[in-house]
Image: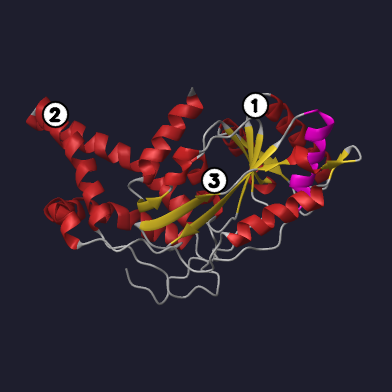
């Protein structure tokens, strides 16, 4: 129940962050049985948030193990369905700890749940596919076969208009699933062939250019002009406050987009509630309720009316470099 509620609210929050999302193929597919979900990995933790919001079924996520070093953060991340994968540099006992994680994954798969893994192993804010780190997929395929779990592998392709600007446009392409049981020979899964098949399918459906939304006639959003202007004057200060703070804190990293979304996702409802409550105390309940409903509507119009900025320099990692950009 908690997972479904969290996914619902994340999905709603994304409407205020991604003004043009091409994900219509999601309505035409479902995950048939236990599955490994794989995808290209251009935008750090934001990729996992999007897939969590729109993929059917309950997903567990394999994420970098160094994030779990703090005991409190470890508890929080595990409550959010994340599982650690360690590198040799993260922990001298990385192999043993990873075995525990893979065992947990097999238990979840046996229950019909799904595991999300990014085969590239890292993210660089680039529109190209990095070499795969095959260890995670290989271990899951082999252990699933040993546990007699008929595993499906569902690949997706993610593309963004930008990793730095809001609002953004995004495309999600659902590819044909790979049935691991079709690659069993001599009582073992041909993991190398499976991974090569996945990489070829992802590459065939990727473009090394930013996602460009279709051009819309101005008249389709003309009705938003006034509420968008009101939304700008009532909200832009709040967005700019968070943007500048997180831009500074994440300078030179790939986490700007995901951390900015999470900060706005958690803090904006509190802002709306506090403003509505204070005004309700002075102006009455109905005035407070009106503000409570009006503020999100105005901010939504501001995001939807604002033009989408598409990146023009695509050959180098962005690493939150805003030196030559004024926004």
- Residue 289 percent across, percent down from the top left: 16, 30
Q: Residue at x 36, y 39 (%)?
A: 12
User: Residue 112, which numbered label?
Assistant: 1
243 lies left or right of 113: left
Range of magenta residues: 134-148
Magenta-drawn stretch, dominant element (helix, strand or loop): helix
- Residue at x-position 29% and y-position 64%: 215
Q: In the image, residue 137 lies at what x, y percent?
A: 74, 46
Circle 2 sits on which residue? 281
Q: Is residue 180 left or right of residue 277?
A: right
Q: Position of residue 281 (x, y in %)?
A: 13, 29
- Determine the secondary structure under disc 3: helix
Q: Nearer the viewer, residue 297 or 91?
A: 297
Name the N-terminal-most of marks 1 and 3: 3
Secondary structure under tag 1 reads loop
Judge from the rendering whether residue 240 lies leftward or rightward of residue 222; answer left or right. right
Discs 1/3, front: 1
Q: Is residue 250 left or right of residue 20?
A: right
Residue 148 seen in the current view: yes
Residue 255 is one of the magenta-drawn residues: no
Find disc 3 in the rendering and name its residue. Answer: 48
The part of the image, by quadrant, that contains residue 24 is: top left
**Whole-Å distance between the Cαs marked 1 and 2?**
50 Å
159 in relation to 94, above or below: below
Judged by depth in the image, the label closer to the viewer, 2 or 3, is 3
Q: Is residue 70 visible?
A: no
Q: Of the residues under marks 1 and 2, which one precedes in the sequence?
A: 1
Comparing 123 with 148, the one in front is 148
Colour logic: secondary structure
Under circle 2, the secondary element is: helix
């Amino acid at each position: 129940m908690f997972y479904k509620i969290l996914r619902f609210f994340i999905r709603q929050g994304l409407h205020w962050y991604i003004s043009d999302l091409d994900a219509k193929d999601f309505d035409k597919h479902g995950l048939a049985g236990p599955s490994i979900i794989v995808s290209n990995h251009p935008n750090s933790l934001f990729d996992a948030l999007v897939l969590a919001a729109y993929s059917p079924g309950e997903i567990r996520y394999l994420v970098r193990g160094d994030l779990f070093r703090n005991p409190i953060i470890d508890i929080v991340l595990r409550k959010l369905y994340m599982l650690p994968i360690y590198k040799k540099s993260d922990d001298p006992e990385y192999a043993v700890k990873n075995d525990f994680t893979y065992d947990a994954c097999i238990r979840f798969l046996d229950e019909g749940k799904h595991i999300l893994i990014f085969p590239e192993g890292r993210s660089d804010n680039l529109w190209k596919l990095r070499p795969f780190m095959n260890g995670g997929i290989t271990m899951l395929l082999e252990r699933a076969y040993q546990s007699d779990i008929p595993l499906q592998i569902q690949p997706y392709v993610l593309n963004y208009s930008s990793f730095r600007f809001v609002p953004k446009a995004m495309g999600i392409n659902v590819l044909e699933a790979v049935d691991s049981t079709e690659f069993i020979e001599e009582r073992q899964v041909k993991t190398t062939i499976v991974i090569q098949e996945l990489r070829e399918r992802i590459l065939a459906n990727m473009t090394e250019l930013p996602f460009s939304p279709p051009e819309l006639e101005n008249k389709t959003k003309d009705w938003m002009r006034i509420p968008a202007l009101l939304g700008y004057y009532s909200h832009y200060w709040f967005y700019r406050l968070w943007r500048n703070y997180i831009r500074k804190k994440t300078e030179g990293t790939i986490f700007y987009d995901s951390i900015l979304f999470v900060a706005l996702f958690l803090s904006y409802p509190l802002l709306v509630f506090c403003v509505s409550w204070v005004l309700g105390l002075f102006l009455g309940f109905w005035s407070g309720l009106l503000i409570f409903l009006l503020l999100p509507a105005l901010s939504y119009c501001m995001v939807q009316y604002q033009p989408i900025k598409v990146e023009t320099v695509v050959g180098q990692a962005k690493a939150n470099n805003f030196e030559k950009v004024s926004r």
